[in-house]
Image (cartoon, helix red, strand yellow):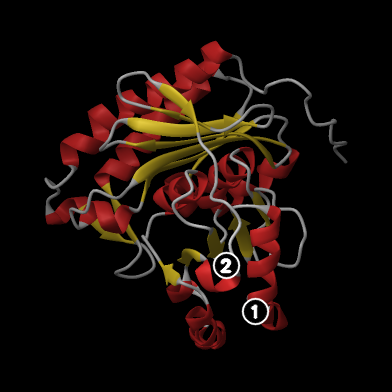
Amino acid sequence: MTTQLPMPVTAPLTQAQKTQIINLIRRAARAEIMPRFRRLDAGEIDQKKDENDLVTQADIAAEAMITRGLQMAFPHALVIGEEAVSAKPDLLDGVGEAELSFIIDPVDGTWNFAKGMPLFGTMVSVCRFGQPVFGLIYDPVGDDLVMADNTSPATWHTQTGRTRRIHTAPDKPLDALAGYAHIRLMPPADRALMWTKVGAVAYVGSLRCSAHEYRMLATGAVDFVLSGHLNSWDHAAGVLICQQAGGKAAMLDGSDYTATVSTGYLLAAASDAVWDTAATHFADLLSDT
């Protein structure tokens, strides 16, 4: 039995290591992602589960490049990519036991990417024993990123090298809340329930891209993100960035989120107060989970 070590009180990565990761992600985007954007042949797009769950040659090539780079830079770390897990699901079993793991989503929002919509991103999280301690969300189109670790505020890094802190939105009442909910991915009974709930808030939508949904939350554009489809590559980085931008992220039942959680509903919100308001409103979803 592996005993978990205490969470680190210092930053999990040095600034030099963060820069190394950022440069690797940018190189992968320039070499493997952007040259294929709006240039994919039919043979470069495949279905996984159905026509809404796609994988492209950009996903595969970018993940391979990022994985190689991280394995070279962090030879003792567990490095896991979305496409590798698709081929070998038990790769995720080691995350909770790994002192240092990287979880990669090379092209989050693949459906958007494959359809030519410029709303996709690259997500990388670093975890210790399944707990996110560093997160990065990169936008290949804008060539900018948001990131945070567990010891410092979330920041936005522009294409020109400027950096600024980001913060979630101020508190609002229920009828003024706007957010994203992955309703189409919910079980049929929960989808029906959600449609009875959305009228009480100002707006509920979906970007089909967790990377940009979490960016919008962390920069104050929306108030919450609710998801019951808990692939760790879609959420680990965004949860940490949301928290370090002033928000709260937890399972809808109030339990902590870690990268090992695969069932239930995850609610990320702009603040403790907004989380409580949204969690109370959507609490009926817990009856079927």
* Viewer can see residue 210: yes
* Quarter of the image that includes the C terminus: bottom right
Amino acid type indicated by mark 2: Gly
Which of the two discs, 2 and 1, sits closer to the camera? Answer: 1
Report the number of discs. Answer: 2
Reading the image, the residue beneath label 2 is 228
33 or 120: which is nearer to us?
120
- Residue at image coords 47%, 43%: 219
* Viewer can see residue 251: no
Report whether 259 appears left or right of 6: left
Q: Quadrant of residue 125?
A: top right
- Specify the label residue 39 is tagged with: none
Mark 2 or 1, nearer chain start:
2
Q: Is residue 134 above or below residue 1?
A: above
Report whether 31 appears left or right of 201: left
Q: Are marks 2 and 1 in contact (CB under 8 Å)?
A: yes
The picture places residue 21, in percent across and down from the top left corner, at: 46, 22
Amino acid type indicated by mark 1: Leu
Helix, strand or loop status at disc 2: loop
Q: Quadrant of residue 135?
A: top right
The picture places residue 53, in percent across and down from the top left corner, at: 35, 63
Reading the image, the residue beneath label 1 is 285
- Residue at image coords 29%, 50%: 119
Q: CA distance from mark 2 to mark 1?
A: 10 Å
Q: Is residue 119 above or below residue 52?
A: above
Helix, strand or loop status at disc 1: helix
201 or 192: which is nearer to us?
201
Q: Is residue 88 above or below residue 166?
A: below
